[in-house]
Image: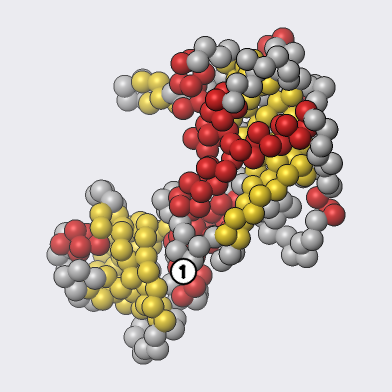
């Protein structure tokens, strides 16, 4: 194992796992890992271990799972590791005393081209807003969230049919090498960090945490592109949803995972649902949205052919 620097890795999601594995595979000196507490399933009281914790246990890396990041006992425990540098990928906001103590600093990897899309859901919002590019940014953590000096950036294209899940997979693949390149640049003092206010963005967009309300589709108020992008940007999670109305006064919640769009002039009411044996399309402004994969509340996610087979009433359907 490399003796320098001593690294503490901080992360909790499957996205962060790729960076951790790359560091370990390249034989960097990971002296400790900080991750979230175990997710305990209430029914059977079974602990659901994150991939980060499983990897730490498998490779005998010391681990901390603080319930309270500002607790003095957590600070005392992490400081005992005496890290030279800390690397953060997909974690909560750290208090200053945690990120400021390593002599080489603490850097974070964020899934956007900062200062664009600061916040908890950069991948989702980039697609929802119809962007054609995004990327990864590494930066030194500072007092303000996602606002520290930029170290490196890597740009990738967003394909027209990409879902948030598709884009996340591609970003995962380049996240590990990005972490290594940043770390080596810091060690060798070959990176000159850049303040975010010196970057070339005239209109800044944020990426706040997505609520259930944000996921509702507004068919009448939205353009065909806005609807298409929203569904892609929320798939597979947290998922766009609507109400499917039948018999005029009965409603069922419908989650929509995958769609296609067709621009076409028509005189149909917005939100009218057309069903055939293998097709479900919704009339929208200037075209149609074809639902390819969805889930009726209380049922499993299905391709559209199977979902249609389970719908008894096939006329006078609307989405609201």
Please tell me whether residue 188 is drawn above or below residue 309 in the rendered image.
above
In the displayed structure, does residue 194 sit left or right of residue 78?
right
Please tell me whether residue 88 is drawn above or below residue 311 in the rendered image.
above
In the displayed structure, does residue 93 sit left or right of residue 229?
right
In the displayed structure, does residue 34 sit left or right of residue 247?
right
Residue displayed at 19% across by 73% down: 276
Q: Which corner quadrant holds the C terminus?
A: bottom left
Q: Residues within 10 Å of mark 1 (few under 14, many from 20)?
A: many
Q: Locate residue 126, reporting x and y percent.
A: 58, 58
Q: Locate residue 146, reporting x and y percent.
A: 72, 43
Residue displayed at 44% across by 23% down: 49
Q: Secondary structure at mark 1?
A: helix
Please tell me whether residue 16 is drawn above or below residue 55 in the rendered image.
below
Q: Nearer the viewer, residue 176 or 47?
A: 176
Residue displayed at 52% across by 42% down: 173
Q: Locate residue 66, reporting x and y percent.
A: 60, 20
Q: Nearer the viewer, residue 72 or 278?
A: 278
Q: Nearer the viewer, residue 238 or 16?
A: 16
Residue displayed at 46% across by 52% down: 166
Q: Which residue is mark 1?
A: 227
Please tell me whether residue 246 is drawn above or below residue 2 in the rendered image.
below
Q: Which corner quadrant holds the N terminus?
A: top right
Q: Does any portion of residue 58 appear in the rendered image?
A: yes
């Amino acid at each position: 194992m490399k003796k320098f620097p001593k690294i503490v890795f901080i992360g909790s999601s499957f996205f962060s796992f790729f960076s951790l594995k790359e560091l370990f595979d390249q034989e960097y000196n990971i002296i400790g890992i900080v991750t979230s507490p175990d997710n305990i399933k209430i029914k059977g009281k079974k602990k659901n271990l994150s991939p980060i914790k499983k990897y730490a246990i498998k490779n005998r890396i010391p681990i901390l799972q603080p319930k309270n990041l500002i607790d003095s006992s957590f600070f005392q425990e992490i400081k005992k590791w005496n890290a030279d540098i800390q690397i953060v990928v997909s974690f909560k906001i750290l208090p200053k005393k945690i990120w400021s103590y390593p002599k080489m600093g603490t850097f974070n990897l964020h899934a956007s081209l900062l200062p664009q899309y600061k916040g908890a859901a950069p991948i989702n919002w980039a697609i929802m807003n119809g962007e054609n590019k995004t990327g990864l940014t590494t930066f030194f953590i500072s007092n303000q969230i996602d606002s520290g000096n930029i170290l490196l950036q890597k740009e990738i294209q967003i394909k027209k049919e990409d879902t948030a899940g598709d884009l996340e997979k591609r970003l995962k693949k380049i996240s590990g090498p990005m972490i290594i390149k940043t770390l080596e640049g810091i060690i060798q003092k070959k990176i000159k960090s850049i303040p975010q206010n010196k970057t070339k963005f005239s209109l800044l967009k944020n990426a706040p945490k997505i609520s259930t309300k944000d996921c509702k589709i507004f068919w009448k108020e939205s353009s065909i592109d806005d609807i298409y992008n929203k569904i892609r940007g929320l798939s597979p999670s947290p998922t766009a949803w609507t109400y499917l109305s039948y018999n005029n006064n009965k409603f069922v919640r419908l989650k929509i995972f995958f769609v296609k769009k067709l621009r076409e002039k028509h005189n149909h009411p917005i939100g009218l649902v057309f069903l055939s044996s293998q097709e479900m399309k919704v009339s929208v402004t200037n075209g149609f949205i074809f639902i390819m994969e969805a889930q009726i509340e209380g049922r499993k996610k299905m391709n559209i052919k199977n979902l249609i087979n389970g719908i008894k009433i096939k006329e006078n359907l609307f989405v609201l």
